[in-house]
Image: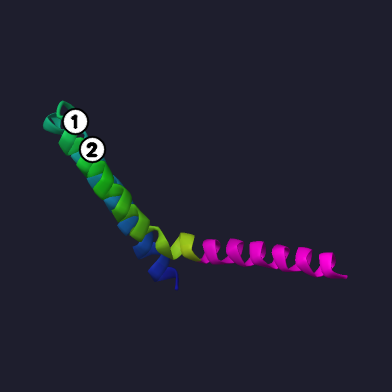
Amino acid sequence: MEKILIKYGEILLDNIEKDQQMITNPWMIFTVIPLLLYIIFALIKWYFLLAPITVPFGFFSWGMTVQKLISKFQKKNE
């Protein structure tokens, strides 16, 4: 498990460096449309890269919200 987490961290750091290199290219800084397209691409890419971290937290928070709604509904009907 530790090797997997280390490899996952390396992948994230590598992608941070690649994004930083791409955005700091001179032709990207002075042209707006390629920069905006790359930012959209990077947002989608990071959504999938961070999914192993964010999905479990999302399910947990969604489950807690549903549980609160159920308990409110049950108290209301008593």
Q: Quadrant of the C terminus?
A: bottom right
Query: Residue 64: within the magenta?
Result: yes
State whether residue 14 is above or below residue 76.
Answer: above
> Could one spot residue 51 in this view of the protein?
yes
In the picture provided, is 7 more to the left or to the right than 25?
right
Q: Residue furthest right?
A: 78
The spot of residue 61 in percent (x, y) is 60, 61
Most common secondary structure along the magenta stretch? helix
The local crowd at label 2, few if under 14, some if 14 to 19, many if 20 or more residues have their Cα within 10 Å, is few
Spatial distance from mark 2 to mark 1, Cα to Cα? 6 Å
State whether residue 52 is above or below residue 31.
Answer: below
Residue at the location (47% across, 64% down)?
A: 55
Residue at the location (19% across, 30% down)?
A: 32
Residue on which the image places disc 2: 36
The residue lying toward the viewer, choosing from 19 and 7, is: 19
Q: Are marks 2 and 1 in contact (CB under 8 Å)?
A: yes
Query: Residue 67: within the magenta?
Result: yes
Q: Residue furthest top?
A: 30
In the picture provided, is 31 more to the left or to the right than 4?
left
Inspect the image, locate mark 1, and give the three-letter code of the amino acid beneath it: Val
Residue on which the image places disc 1: 32
What residue span does the magenta drawing correspond to?
56-78
In the picture provided, is 63 more to the left or to the right than 21?
right
Residue at the location (65% across, 61% down)?
A: 65
Q: Quadrant of the N terminus?
A: bottom left
> Could one spot residue 17 in this view of the protein?
no
Helix, strand or loop at label 1? It is helix
Helix, strand or loop at label 2? It is helix
Q: Residue furthest front?
A: 77
The spot of residue 60 in percent (x, y) is 59, 65
Inspect the image, locate mark 2, and give the three-letter code of the amino acid beneath it: Leu
Q: Quadrant of residue 31?
A: top left
